[in-house]
Structure formats: C-alpha cells, structure tokens
Amino acid sequence: MLGKVIGFFKPVKFKKNGDIHDVLVVALPMLLSMSFDTLMTFVDRLFLSKLGPAEMNASLGAGGMNMVLTTFFTGMISYTTAMVAQRFGAGKKNECASVFMQAVYLSIVCVPLLYLTIPLGHLIFDHQGVAPDQLVHQKTYFNILMFGGVVTLIRNAAPCFFSGIGETKIIMKAAFVGMLVNIVCNYFLIFGVGPFPRFGVAGAAYGTVIGNIVSTAMLFIVYFSKKNHCRFATRSNLKVNFEQVKELLKRGLPSGVEMFLNMAAFQLLILIFHGLGPEMATAASVMFNWDMVAYVPLMGLEVASTSLVGRYVGAKQAAAATRSTRSGLKVGWAYSLMIGVLLVFLPGVLTDIFRPEATASAEALAIFEAARPMSIFMLRFATIYIFVEVLLVIYCGALRGAGDTVWVMIACGIMNWFNTVALYVATHIFNVPGHYAWIIVVGVYGTAPLIFWRRWKNGKWRRHVLDAE
C-alpha cells in the first residue's frame, strides 16, 4: 500500500499523453482564467463591503440567484468544450468551428427564455426573509445582471472553442483584461470618483457587464483571426447545422440540468444562512467569498479534464484519458495545499479584509464584529473539503469529457440537495447555530466526491470510447 502511495506522487516523465505537462498546458491558463473571473467578483463584494454588510450580502444573494437562473443555459452550452475536443482529437478540424457556432446561435436563442425568469428571482427574494435594506440592493444588482444576460450567455460559449482545442492561454488573457476593466469600472461607478456619479450596488453590476463585454470581444477577435481561419475555416463555418445542435442538446441538456440543480441547491443553502439574521448572513458571506476564491479556480481544472478526456476519447486513447485524470489530481492537490495554509492560519486576516470603513454606521460595524468569530470558525472548517473537492472537479470533468453526463447529473443533484436539506433540518428543526451547522455541509461535500472516484475507477465510462469507435 505504501509503495502505491509513493508511486502515485513520484515525479512524472513528460513523455506520454495525459502526463502532468500535458495537463498543465491546458489547465494552468484555465485555472488562472477562473481565478481572474473569481477576483472580478471578489473585488465587487470587497468594494461593496466598505459601504456596509447589507450591500455586500446583497451582491452575494443576487449574484447567486443570477447564476442559478443562467446556469441551466450555460451548463448546457458548456458541453461544447467536449464536442470540440472530441472532433479535434479525431482530426475533424472544420467541424470544431461549426460546433462552436451552433453554441453561439443556441446562446442567442436562449436569451428571451432567460429574461422570462426575472420575475421568479424577485418572487424568491420577497419570500427570503432578508433585511429590507438588503432586499432593495439585491433586486437592483440582480436586475442589471439579468438584463445583461445576453452578454453572459455568449461569454460562456466563447471560451469553449479554445478550451476544446487545448489553446487556453487566450482565455486567460481575455479574462485578465476583463477583470482589469471590471475593477476600474467598479472603483469609479461604486464610489462615484471624479465626474462619475455614485451608483453603489448598481455600479458593481454595471462594471461586471462591461468587463464581460470586453473579454468576450477579445475571444471573438482571435477566433475570426486569419490564423484560426486557416486552421479551422472559422469564417466559413457559419451555417446552422441541426445535427450538431441536436447532439449538443442531447449531450448538453444533462449538464445544464445538473448545473442548474447544483446552483439552485447552493443558492438555497446561502438563503438559509442569510435567513438566520444579519450577523450570520455576514459571516456566511465572508466565508463564501473566500470559498469562491478557493474553489472556482479548481473549475479550471474541471474544464481542462473535460477537454483532455474528450480529446483522448475522440482519438480512442483510453489509457491517456486515465493518465490525464491522475495528473489533474496532483495539480489540484498542490493548489489546495496552498489555499489550506491560508484558511487554517490566517482566517482572522481574511475576515478583516471585509470590515466596513470606520465611517460606516454603528449598526454595520456592530454586525461585523458579531459575525467575525463565526466567520473564522467557518473558514477553518472549509479547509477540509477543499482537498476532497479536487476529486469532484477532476472526475466530474473527466466523466463529462467521456460522455457520461447523465450519471454525473444525477449524482451531483443528489449530493447538493441532500446537503441543503440537511442544513435546513439542522438550523430550523434542531435549532443548531448556523456556524455549527456548517460542519454538516463540510461533512457532505467532503465525503461525497468519493462516489465520483468510484464511478471513474469501475470503468463504465469506457463504453463511450467504444461508441466513438
């Protein structure tokens, strides 16, 4: 047993498809890209925290609801990465561009459907039980993000082509520029610097939309460049292909349903914490902001896993697909180790970053001081599942890349909803304080990913390799 453990972590020679070098080429830019996206949202909430806890909590609640209502569409369309990767691995380069354009067209078609969900978000907010001042800010932030949904959906589709062919550096660069634009816009629009009026919460939402527009435009400029047109005929493959749309819907719908169920459960989990009073809402907001910083970049590894496994399935290389998952785990755990050190040893420092300005109201300062010890407690416990969640992102991505999307959908849905129900029972039936109930959430998220590991190990996903043959 010890020999196997040592063998798993011994240095890898960069000679085979699916080794660490292979994974890093795709994953590192995606991890950085997700980090930039995370930092963009993080700065929104950090700036708003200086206005007061109500503004910061509103951005978390509204941003989460926006993600819930868009995730079905973005999750469905994100399967484009696997479809492009499979065709790229099979040497069908012209089809890569055609598949991508179907994703863009489908994104545009989904926009009116997304707008129809706005009243649902308002209805949920009205029954959430949050403080009146937070509710006003929450609806403002939510409305702007939702009406910018056309940008959100197209921006979600835009990176799929590049992640599918494994050229993820451009995604990283676009995300970096979008982040810078967002931060600058936030500073001027939230606080009202110079000739700009003070928009507050609305300014944070406008900054997000503007940053997304810039990063999306960059990706499309590169996509239609002369270089990519010569390789993939990007300017010629513009027709609607109903067969590819049908394939995208067939394979992507399970991913869309899965991500919708996951985000809906997670948003409900946040709403449960926010319904326990402003102190608990503030503690949870601080914790989830840092949780986002820790976890979201790992989703870059998930996209890389989907891309590499999809490519090797298309090329009929099951052994390389298996190697890429092992390499992804090593990269993920190295990242989680760095995050874990911060969460264990510096939770107080991480919490105090969100302290309101001294000029904030006495009530806002009192709420933060009451929330601080709860936030520190929750951050330390979050360390546990950050390590185990690496299993989830790697094996979820790998199973999607292999086409095993229905099983992933069912398993993720059960995991997330069980967790939310468990939190509700603990806090509302047994009256467990929110920060202690967080231990239950960590326990479920920390152990459930082992199921995904077992699914990959039993090899049932290999039938999709046979289908590709």
Image (cartoon, grey):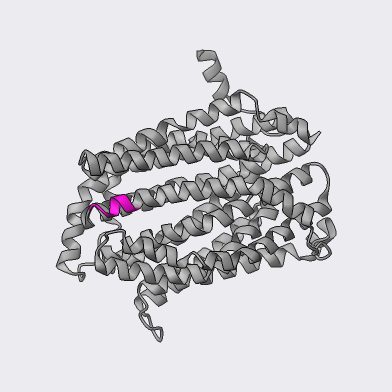
Which quadrant holds residue 437?
top left
In the picture shown, does residue 241 fall above or below 380? Answer: below
39 on left or right of 174: left
In the picture shown, does residue 187 fall above or below 81? Answer: below
277 on left or right of 312: left
Identified at 65% across, 60% down, the residue is: 158
In the picture shown, does residue 267 fall above or below 222? Answer: above
Query: Could you say which is closer to the camera, residue 186 or residue 389?
Result: 389
Identified at 67% across, 44% down, the residue is: 307
Query: Could you say which is closer to the camera, residue 382 or residue 469?
Result: 469
Task: Locate residue 266, reporting x and y percent.
Answer: 41, 48
The answer, for residue 24, to whether it is visible in the render is no
How many numbered marks does the figure carry? 0
Residue 275 magenta:
yes
Q: Quadrant of the C terminus?
A: top right
Identified at 33% across, 49% down, the residue is: 287
The answer, for residue 245, to whether it is visible in the render is yes
Which stretch is magenta? 271-276
Task: Locate residue 63, reporting x and y percent.
Answer: 42, 61
Residue 427 magenta:
no
Task: Locate residue 433, reporting x and y percent.
Answer: 21, 43
Identified at 72% across, 33% down, the residue is: 464
